Image (tube, rainbow, N blue to C red):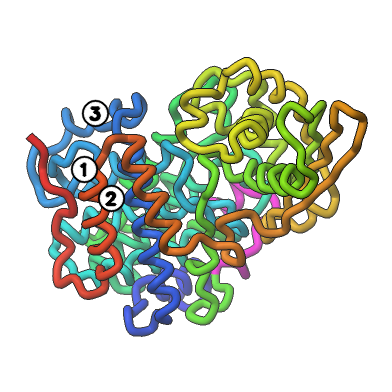
Amino acid sequence: MTLDTNPSATLAAFAAGLQFDAIPAPVLRRTEDLFLDWYASALAGKGARPVEAIEAYARSMGPDSGRAEVLISRRTTSPHFAAMVNAAASHFAEQDDVHNGSVFHPAAVVFPVALAIAQDIGASGREFLAAVVAGYEVGIRVGEFLGRSHYRIFHTTATAGTLAAAAAAGRLLKLDAATMLHAFGSAGTQAAGLWEFLRDAADSKQLHTAHAASSGLASAYLARSGFTGARQILEGAQGMASGMSSDADPARLTDRLGQRWATAETSFKYHASCRHTHPSADALLTLMQTHGVEADDIESVTTQVHQGAIDVLGRVTVPATVHQAKFSMGTVLALAAEYGFAGLNEFEAHYLAPRVAALRDRVTMQLDAEVDQAYPQRWIGKVTVTTRDGRSLSARVDEPKGDPGNTLTRAEIEDKAQRLAAYGKGATPAEVQALIARVWAVAEAPRMDRWLEARA
């Protein structure tokens, strides 16, 4: 079989051959925005028990020196273990980015790998950005290919993310198309991650990104050494789609490669919660502002949602942890109603507060045909509120805050970065300000050296 006869190979060839100069300037600027957003999300993971557990494991297993930076501890180690820890850290606060159509969080698996390898080999900022875009474009298309049926059981960031990580790693290692395809094969056969953890408030979500990043990275290095992988790992008769999807569409793997830049379609997260809650939270806030409704005026809330929201959020009734609360539609809407924002500090301080819990229990999700049909390309938010004085009020949003058509400005991204770093105490305000300046100039960096000074 020649390299141009299957979608997996076409996608691998694209990732291997992507050049910085072929990427449009607006896509590069968006990639810089996403880099800052990811970096700050990783800093927010400092001190989180699941993240620190993975850091302790990496510290015990990995070298105690190297060129790749572990952001939460500021130590250095091998690319493998730096990528593992940074991936776990950046997915903890539920503030990392998301691509709607693939229901995939690219940053948490692409940036950790690209930064670790770029630091290790001394790659330039231009090479780093090209690798990141390669990872985003591959991962998003794999997520779209696997479809809605996949997401019902599998955490797409863990599965498609393994391929995304391999693409970013392979691009930095300058794999040719044939070798990149082998990296994809090894990455795909390791792809895993199940939603069952939500039922138990387990720590698996951090393991999902840690595993995807480190396995994708290992797949690229192994391929460079001659290790072979399945050449149709995605669409083959016993490949990922066969085992993990009932509605896979191979055409999505090669959708307008080099013309449609899926990286630029990626959304930022405004609320510090599962993205499935954001459309409803924004719709509720719109309703409250439009009609002058206060939290005390609300008798009940019905939010009209897509099936994916019910599949993921329906497992959580009374959250046992702050992290599980971020997957509780009732908790998110109650926090938004009480505080105007479901942010990091609001969750930390109030997720089980009596007033929040009381409103949480009066929130109902209801499948809506229009919302479900539009998903995942569009995430529409609809809510209906019954007030204590008997009124029935409704509102909707068609683009939640952070979506490409309602995106965050650079000033808003900078403000978010400061809040994230402060939450995890991962960096001082002055350090974040210096970090921001470096990110906006990353394309001119001759080498991707360490970004934060070591602490005693």
Q: Earlier in the sequence, mark 1 or mark 3?
A: 3
Q: Nearer the viewer, mark 2 or mark 3?
A: 3
**Within the image, what quadrant is residue 377 found in?**
bottom right
330 vs 48, left or right, is right
Q: In this view, does 438 lie above or below 44?
A: below
Q: Mark 1 points at which residue?
A: 70
x and y, in percent, of residue 105 in the image = 49, 51
Quarter of the rendering occupied by the C terminus: top left
Residue count near mark 3 (Cα–Cα under 10 Å), binned few <14, some 14–19, many ≥20: few
Badge 3 amino acid: Tyr
Residue depicted at x 21% and y 43%: 70
Q: Are marks 1 and 3 in contact (CB under 8 Å)?
A: no
Task: Name the residue at the bottom extreme.
Answer: 21
| Viewer-nearest residue: 3 or 331 | 331
The stretch in magenta equals: 236-253
Q: Mark 2 points at which residue?
A: 218
Residue depicted at x 51% and y 29%: 347
